[in-house]
Amino acid sequence: MSKEHGEIESLRRTIEQLSDQIIRNKEQEERILNEFSEMNNELVTLQRLLAKNNASLETAKNKALAADELKSSFIAVISHDFRTPLNGILGMAELMQRSALTGEQKNSVAVIQDAAKLLLNLIEDLLDLSKLEAGQLRLEIAELELKSIFDTIFRLLEPKAQHNGNQLSLDYDSRVSTVLKGDVTRITQVLINLIQNANKFTAQGSVRIRVTLAKECDASQSIRFEVEDTGIGIAEEDQKTLFQPYTQTERGRAREYEGTGLGLSICHSLVSLMNGQIGVQSQEGQGSTFWFELPLGKTDQDRSSSQADEVLSQENQDQSDTTTDTVSILLADDNVINRQVVVMQLKKLGITEVDSVSNGEEAVSAFLSKPYSLILMDNVMPIMDGLEATRKIRAMEEDEMRLSIPIIAMTGNVMDGEKDKCIEAGMNDFIGKPFTLEELNNIIQQWQQAFQSRDVLNMSIVNEIVDLSSEGDPTLLGMLLNMYRKETPGKIEGLRRHIVSGNHVAAVEIAHDLKSASLSLGIDYLSTLFAQIEQFAKEGQSRKAEASLNALLPAYKEACSALERVSNLIENG
């Protein structure tokens, strides 16, 4: 019995141990489950917090985007609303200055001009600063000639330097490439600002500009620009904050040196945007040297000195105040003062056939009532704005197979992207308010010459086709014309679809094909339009091709009619 009892006791202890183990495992399992439950609850809580934070971040992001859009819209409105009356002030002052005035009256007009230009500079600086802060300023990289830039700057600023008794000079490193790549507008803006500052704080001295090659590699040259003056100089403590917005030295704030305090800050931002550096070396009372370095891309293209001389000669040509050709203009602007000023400016240019309207709807009606040589169209107008009016005019030209009339945007909104909107709507060019008489004359002459000088046919090529006919058989030209008429309309429609859909590769191919076919028949103007569209497609600039697209069908119809007349003359001759 004892043996059996022992076995029973052993078995009992084993069972107890197993029970204890089971209980401990169960307790551990419960602890793990509880911990898992707590962790799961914490995870759910974190997920809720994360979702809440994401929602808050999305709300904050949307608010920031809305604020940026509101700010951009506000700036655009302010720009337009300031520039429009400024155009009236400066335009009228310029016309008065050109009339017979007494000395006292001329001085009064000069004061008006100086005050208006100071206000315009302030607006320009505020707009540039706002665009830079919002990241809306974009560089436009293209080929440039630094010497040409300085030719322009010297013509602009040398009279001001002489007025202060200063000598303006340029030292130019011959190692700098003739043609480089960069943003010519922004480089010019920085140089003008620095040179104007140097001249403003210097009297009876000198302003010397140096251009040197700082570094060169296979793809670019790093160019150092220095503007050294013999003026009042800058104290060391003021140099630390010189490139911050609204910062001026104590002497710089003096009345005789009045300014916005934004110029150097904008220069710093522009140079940084162009991946460059800017700085200053100065001692109070001993002048200053402002410098900046920019990496500018190299190009394989170079221009001969004879071409440069030719361009320089055309910069130096005297310009007449009046246009010689008869021009009829439609002016659309809702501001009555601006309309009066522009009409007077046009009259000064010898253009008396001017009709003026106050909104886009009236502009469309006027377009339908009589032919015009050119339309000057404000963008912001009541009832119908200039962009919508332009779209309607282009649609009617296309429907009625009319040749496109040049439409020039004339607006106070000069924010980045505004010119693209105008081109997309079908406008040909853009002039920002306020503008001078010379600027207005240049843009009118440019588009009138382009409109009037286009040759529908290249008669030398047409005559070659006629000469190819066997024994003077005139049917070859007619046969080629019929083939051209059969294929071209469908291809033009295909080209339009490719441009609208953004299929640039296909657009390039079909535009090139149409260009070649047109050139082979001597159809010059239409082939030029195809070449423009081909280039825009290569650059991926579909919107810029809109105006040329709208001109295709009228130009096609005109070319076919001209060729048909030639063919008929040959057959009947």
Image (cartoon, grey):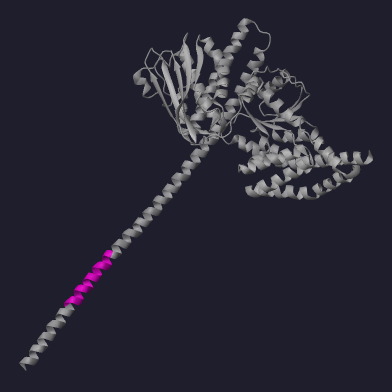
Q: Main secondary structure of the magenta part?
A: helix
Please state if 306 lies on the left or on the right of 219 as rendered: right
Q: In the image, is residue 308 above or below residue 465?
A: above
Q: Residue at x 77, y 43 (%)?
A: 399
Please state if 501 lies on the left or on the right of 26 as rendered: right
29 inside magenta stretch: yes
Which image quadrant: the N terminus?
bottom left
Q: Residue at x 81, y 39 (%)?
A: 558
Seen from this angle, which residue lies furthest top?
103
Q: Residue at x 37, y 53 (%)?
A: 49
Q: In the image, is residue 80 above or below residue 284?
A: below
Q: In the image, is residue 48 above or below residue 541?
A: below
- Residue 371 visible somewhere in the drawing: yes
Estimate the x, y position of residue 290 in percent, counting from the top left.
43, 21
Seen from this angle, which residue lies furthest front?
471
Seen from this angle, which residue lies furthest right?
572
In the image, the segment drawn in magenta is: 20-35
439 inside magenta stretch: no
